Amino acid sequence: AQSVTQPDIHITVSEGASLELRCNYSYGATPYLFWYVQSPGQGLQLLLKYFSGDTLVQGIKGFEAEFKRSQSSFNLRKPSVHWSDAAEYFCAVASRSGGGADGLTFGKGTHLIIQP
Amino acid sequence: DAEITQSPRHKITETGRQVTLACHQTWNHNNMFWYRQDLGHGLRLIHYSYGVHDTNKGEVSDGYSVSRSNTEDLPLTLESAASSQTSVYFCASTSSGGHYNEQFFGPGTRLTVL
């Protein structure tokens, strides 16, 4: 069965500093990979996705993520965080064989706190 | 604009009662999903549907059922609510065809079982 690990439950970053959120997955082949953000009391918004090709993918709000097959990782980065980035971040995978139609498997999330 | 809505947004019920959470999408998507979100667990898949009259069990389906009588709606029923089902529930949908299509999520329903 596929699984997603987000090792950091909470991360605190100063405003303007760089950010990296870690994600590791376990899957028989390369799955589809995603990062979602959830602001307090809100639904989920897709930040970016990886299907194939260039291993560095750009997303919305200045985020990027790098797929590393050898490490089974898909880490999310941002060069300079803003107070509005404080939120819960979820890494997720979908199986290629199902085309995503059989649902997403999510990590447990990383809670990002921004210090002024 | 097309959207996905959930109702109610908040619900308090008692143990043993039957509860139905509604999900309605106007994207005309074939695939629909129900997830529950719990602190420390992220989101977990409850049930999903590929189309009318099709339903499938997800990772945490015990105690839940769904039915799909049309394209737009996938109601989630808790036959006999338990305190362990206190959670935030998200509905999602995606179109079929192509190698992958983005899932769009509803705003969530917060359910409390007393």
Image (tube, rainbow, N blue to C red):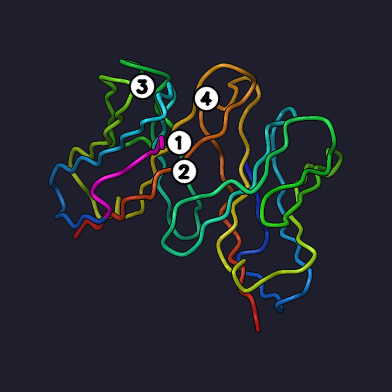
Q: Residue at x 72, y 37 (%)?
A: A50
Query: Where residue A77 sits: x, y (%)?
Result: 76, 58
Q: Secondary structure at mark 3?
A: loop
The magenta region covers: B1-9
The C terminus of chain A - image quarter: bottom right
Q: CA distance from mark 1 to mark 4?
A: 14 Å
Q: Residues within 10 Å of mark 3 (few under 14, many from 20)?
A: some
Front: mark 1 or 4: 4
Q: CA distance from mark 4 to mark 3?
A: 12 Å
Q: Amino acid at mark 3?
A: Thr
Contact between marks 1 and 2 (CB within 8 A): the answer is yes
Residue A56, relative to residue B59: is it above or below? below
Mark 2 lies on residue? B44
Q: Amino acid at mark 1?
A: Glu
What number is the disc on residue A101? 4
> Hey, which quadrant is residue A72 in on the image?
top right
Q: Secondary structure at mark 1?
A: loop
Mark 3 lies on residue? B55
